[in-house]
Amino acid sequence: MLNINIKDSEVKFLINFIKKGLKSARSLTRARILLLANQGKRDTEIAKTLGVGRSTALRIRKRYHEEGLQSALVDKPRSGQPKKYNERHAAEIIALACTKLPEGRKRWSLSLLCEELRKKEGFETINKETIRLILKKNKIKPWLKKMWCIETVDSEFRKRMYDVLDLYEEDYDPKRPIIRLDEKPKQLLEDKRNPIPMKPGSPEKYDYEYVRNGTANIFVAVEFKAGKRTTQVTQRRTMVDFAQFMKRLVIEKYSQAKV
């Protein structure tokens, strides 16, 4: 039997540990194992007293002897199952969900996606729950929504897709910033009636009617690895407007970047 001698300060800690605060049942049992072991009780006695397995008592005693008190009381962090599907796999799943349906099918379902993916290399053991979680993370529900779809996910599409994914995985380099550009039209709206101000017990109230004051366009450049963005509002969305926005980025915002 492995004998352990717990310090007086640790005995006091274990007694308070059991008496005070909210602890997991597992941690409380381990504290009691240590106290009984410190009294010279054998593993079989401890197991019978606490209703645990003899191997449990031996393991906690051994862990205290080799690693100390805290290790004996608390489980070590678990690494968990290694990630089986990476960003490229996720991109393949998303691309498939946005392609044309097989002949005779009305909409994509998890079962159908799983069936089609298992025909591809690297997806032989994929299951519906994995697909669901990936689609949920990317806010894609092909069985519920009408959406723009890619006609065919061919080798050229995959090549371009992987080029973008590889680019996004590069380390941050301020001399070679990775920037995403987008634009969006925006209606300019005005209240038709003045809102009623908030008062105690009643929130501010707005009328559902509004007045249109035209439209505008918003350009945005996002340097996501640096946490930066640049925006510009224009009256229109023409090639000239886009070119001027690009010129602003090159000359004002990223003049030190390597081309």
Image: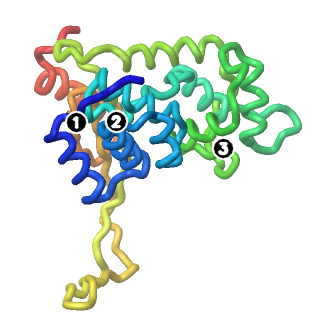
Q: Nearer the viewer, residue 140 or 244?
A: 140
Q: Quadrant of the N terminus?
A: top left
Question: What kind of residue is marked 1?
Answer: Arg
Crowdedness near tag 1: few (<14), some (14–19) or many (≥20) residues, C-alpha within 10 Å: few
Residue topped by disc 1 = 229
CB-based contact (under 8 Å), mark 2 and mark 1:
no
CB-based contact (under 8 Å), mark 1 and mark 3:
no
Q: Position of residue 226 (x, y in %)?
A: 21, 28
With respect to residue 23, does 105 lie above or below?
above
Q: Nearer the viewer, residue 234 or 240?
A: 234
Q: Residue at x 32, y 58 (%)?
A: 22
* Residue 142 badge: 3
| Spatial separation of the CA atoms under disc 3 and disc 2 | 65 Å
N-terminal-most mark, 2 or 1: 2
- Left or right for 56, reference 196: right
Which callout, 3 or 2, points to the residue nearer the camera? 2
Question: What kind of residue is marked 3?
Answer: Pro
